[in-house]
Amino acid sequence: MKHQKKIAIIEDELKLRENISEILQISGYSIVTADSGESGVALIQHEMPDLILCDIKMPGKDGFWVLEQIRNMEKYASIPFIFLTAKVEHKDIRAGMGLGADDYITKPFSVRDLTNAIAVRLKRNELLKSYSSTAESGQVLTQQEIQAYTEKYTNLTKSEKRIFSLIAEGFSSVEIAKQLHNSVKTIENHRSNIILKLGLKGHLSLVKFCITMNNALKSSV
């Protein structure tokens, strides 16, 4: 039987919390909820969800506080985290991305926007887990392979290396564009250049290479 993904919803507005819960249950997800930042962190520790939806503006501890707590706990740090917000300002984007947010959904949002954002984050997280476990299994890179990767990596520009690192951390082109204050088209052009310089075959190969290269660099330090 296919595992039913569990979504944690942290939202102080009861009606909205119930509406989101109903939408996601119909979409086939298991739902757990909390109405405050403090109870949200406790819920995550108890339930270990596959993804977290969290409002930013809440009485008491806000969504930024929740994200910071989760990202500082190793066991929960890799759970995809999506902010729900009525208004997105650049300072909020910078603050959230700096703490490790995966995405923002602006209220009011459509059912399609919500379910698509969740599906994309869950799929990407599964890919990253798969690549990470492959790199951490018995498939250790030889010194010759590490040297070959390092030589390719040194051909990248400073901007490309920054984007390379963000790809390895699992950020999408949209998220990278927000962090670096560039257009998505500019980031996509950089990605294409990186793929060409490294001799790779498409987006998934680039993601895998980034993770492998980061592991190689860490092991060589």
Image (cartoon, rainbow, N blue to C red):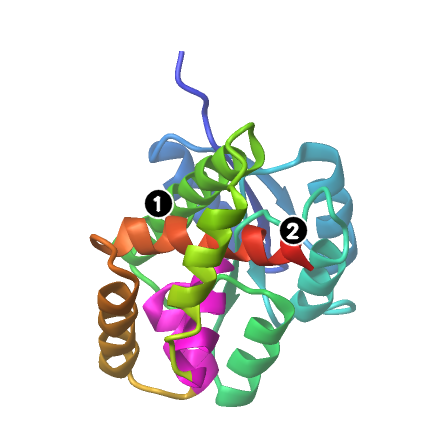
Q: Position of residue 69 (x, y in %)?
A: 76, 59
Does residue 167 appear in this view? yes
80 left or right of 153 in image: right
Q: Position of residue 42 (x, y in %)?
A: 78, 45
Instruction: Kindly report the distance in space between the C-alpha atoms of the residues bearing marks 1 and 2.
Output: 33 Å
- The chief SS type of the magenta part is helix
Q: Which mark is residue 190?
A: none
Q: Nearer the viewer, residue 27 or 144?
A: 144
103 left or right of 193 in image: right
Which residue appears at 48% of the width and 57% of the height?
A: 147
Q: Which residues are magenta?
A: 158-180
Q: Which mark is residue 219?
A: 2
Q: Element under label 2?
A: helix
Quadrant in the picture for the N terminus: top left
Q: Element under label 1?
A: helix
Which residue appears at 45% of the width and 25% of the height?
A: 4
Does residue 15 appear in this view? no
Quadrant in the picture for the C terminus: bottom right
Q: Nearer the viewer, residue 177 or 212?
A: 212
Which residue appears at 48% of the width and 34% of the height?
A: 134
What amino acid is labelled 2 in the image?
Ser
Q: Nearer the viewer, residue 176 or 7?
A: 176
Mark whose residue sits in front, 1 or 2: 2
The residue indicated by pointer 1 is 119
Q: Is residue 26 magenta?
A: no
